[in-house]
Image (tube, rainbow, N blue to C red):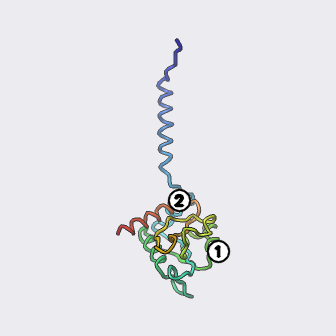
Amino acid sequence: MVRIPRPDAATGAIACLLGVSVILSGCGIPRDPEQSLEAARGAELSAGAVHNPPWVSVEDGERPSGPEVDLIEEYAERIGAQVAWSTGSESGLVGRLHDRQLDVVIGGFDEHTVWDHHAAVTRPYEVPPEGPGRVVLVELGENALLHDLESHFITRDDS
């Protein structure tokens, strides 16, 4: 007869601690390596706006306007932040987003955007009957910010 050794109490305790640590390590998900969400909360959300009516209108010297601007300002209010707006071209603002100088960029982007290799793309906040869903671009890797913004889309739809 072959005897299989029974683990002693110390081995069992180590296995239990390992299991608990694996479970608890998941509590930091979604990750936000640059802490964009926490930095913006109660402070400032850096947003880029590309002129692309009807979603975003940018007039010289004026604050951007349009439904996407309202969406970002509602979100900022929810997290207790002020929006610091920057305006410019798609490539310029996505470059600043990639360089971590902006938190989000809006401009009527759809879910098939060519910028998906340079920015994280939210789930659509709106899906019009005539075309693809509208999205917001977020810093790559800032998953906590991405997730929180998408949660705002859901709570906004429910109200």
Label 1: how many residues lie within 10 Å, few (<14), some (14-19) or many (20+)?
few
Residue named by callout 1: 91
User: Where is residue 41 drawn, in percent x and y?
Assistant: 46, 66
Q: State the SS at label 1.
A: helix
Q: State the SS at label 2.
A: helix
Q: Residue furthest top?
A: 1
Asked whether 96 or 35 is in front, the reply is 96
User: Where is residue 115 drawn, in percent x and y?
Assistant: 62, 68
Q: Residue furthest left?
A: 159
Residue named by callout 2: 143
Q: Residue at x 41, y 69 (%)?
A: 78
Q: Residue at x 47, y 70 (%)?
A: 127
Label 2: how many residues lie within 10 Å, few (<14), some (14-19) or many (20+)?
many
* Quadrant the C terminus occupies: bottom left
Identified by mark 1, the residue type is: Ser
How many callouts does the rendering have? 2
Q: Is residue 10 above or below residue 100?
A: above
Is 94 on the left or on the right of 38, as rendered? Answer: right
Asked whether 139 or 101 is in front, the reply is 139
Q: Is residue 82 above or below residue 21?
A: below
Identified by mark 2, the residue type is: Asn
User: Where is residue 141 drawn, in percent x and y?
Assistant: 58, 59
